[in-house]
Image (cartoon, helix red, strand yellow):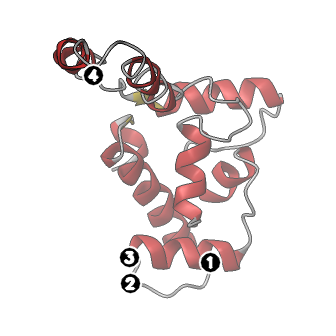
Amino acid sequence: MSIFGKIKDVIFGHNGPLGGQFGGKKDAAPAPAPTPAGGAPHPAPTQQPQSAPAQAPATPAPTPAQPVDVEQVLTSIAAQKGNPNLNWRTSIVDLMKLLDLDSSLDNRKELATELGYSGAKDGSAEMNIWLHKAVMRELEKNGGTVPASMKD
């Protein structure tokens, strides 16, 4: 999995330290669908055509997952960990540490490549600032709500 994919998974609640607390709606939607589909074969064959149209409206009924408030999720993770010294709002290294991801230069270089950084991949302040803002912009593109100060 990509480094950004790992960041996104933790923040959106998939396989992260919060156990799906903040983003489980995406996983919850498919679960109800198999239940009605599994119930359809049990009625007599003459009833199947009647139950299929009744199930069709039930499938579109679930609303799409609401945007994830990225700042709120990260603040909650920071509060749970009790480490107020991490400056995750502006530092890519601290953000990765908060999410229990390897923040080594090699991983940041890989993340820079994934996100299209064209400068020198040397761990400079310029690269790290760009990375943090790029991660926030990508989180927003993927359904997150991010304050302007964290992406501009």
Q: CA distance from mark 2 to mark 4?
A: 44 Å
Q: Which amino acid type corresponds to the residue marked 4 in the rendered image?
A: Thr
> Which residue was labeled with disc 1?
123
Q: Earlier in the sequence, mark 1 or mark 2?
A: 2
Label number found at residue 61 = none
- Residue found at x 56% / y 25%: 22
> Which residue was labeled with disc 4?
59
Q: Nearer the viewer, residue 127 or 43?
A: 43
Q: Are marks 2 and 4 in contact (CB under 8 Å)?
A: no
Q: Earlier in the sequence, mark 2 or mark 4?
A: 4
Secondary structure, mark 2, is loop
Q: Which amino acid type corresponds to the residue marked 2 in the rendered image?
A: Ser
Secondary structure, mark 4, is loop
Q: Are marks 3 and 1 in contact (CB under 8 Å)?
A: no
Observer-side mark, 2 or 4, equals: 4
Label number found at residue 116 = 3
User: The N terminus appears in which quarter of the rendering?
Assistant: bottom right
CA neighbours of label 1 inside 10 A, class few (<14), some (14 to 19), many (20+):
some
Q: Are marks 3 and 2 in contact (CB under 8 Å)?
A: yes
Q: Nearer the viewer, residue 140 or 90?
A: 140
> Which residue was labeled with disc 2?
118
Q: Nearer the viewer, residue 20 or 141?
A: 20
Q: CA distance from mark 3 to mark 1?
A: 15 Å
Observer-side mark, 1 or 2, equals: 2
Observer-side mark, 3 or 1, equals: 3
CA neighbours of label 3 inside 10 A, class few (<14), some (14 to 19), many (20+):
few
Q: Nearer the viewer, residue 18 or 53?
A: 53
Secondary structure, mark 1, is loop
Observer-side mark, 4 or 1, equals: 4
Observer-side mark, 3 or 2, equals: 3
Q: CA distance from mark 3 to mark 2?
A: 6 Å
Q: Earlier in the sequence, mark 4 or mark 1?
A: 4
